Image (cartoon, rainbow, N blue to C red):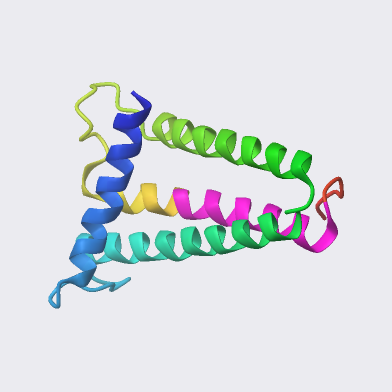
Amino acid sequence: MKKWITGLLVLIVMSSAAFAQDDTLKCNPEGTQIEMNVCAAEDYQKADKKLNETWKKLMVKFKNDKTATTNLKKAQKAWVAFRDADIEAMFSCASGDRVCWGSMESMLRSGELQAMTEARTKRLQHYIDNGLGSSEE
């Protein structure tokens, strides 16, 4: 089930990214739903890229602390599982046919993924800046 959910999310993002590479379909926040979907997918991809860059910096900072890196990896794996489950819960369809959200679903999902990813990035950056065990402001 988890692989199916992850696969679906990847397909949604990749589909939007494929549209973005087409010369006729580009991000246009005031355009068609597909163009807005492309914008949302691009924004999520940027957030995900920043998360990955921040993660790498965090691992470098704590590379000599095996306990910290082990626990951070465990936490990140749990966060990814939570993120995926939360998105699935958020976009549940009572009918089970996955069309209850219509053409906006891709944009809405990408927007939620972006927000969750940016929040996680902020938390990881806080660890880099202030160390583990420090509270966020």
Over which residues does the magenta segment extend? 113-131
40 and 1: which is toward the camera: 1
Q: Give the residue at x 29% y 30%.
A: 4
Q: In the image as oriented, which residue stretches furthest toward the right?
A: 134
Q: Is residue 105 visible?
A: no
The verdict on residue 66 being magenta is no
Quarter holding the N terminus is: top left
52 and 123: which is toward the camera: 52
The verdict on residue 115 being magenta is yes
- Residue 73: percent from the left, percent from the top? 63, 41
Q: Give the residue at x 46% y 49%.
A: 113
- Residue 75: percent from the left, percent from the top? 65, 37
- Residue 23: percent from the left, percent from the top? 14, 78
Dominant SS of magenta comes to: helix
Vertical order, 130 against 5 (above or below) = below
Left-right relation of 124 to 92: right
Q: Give the residue at x 29% y 38%.
A: 7
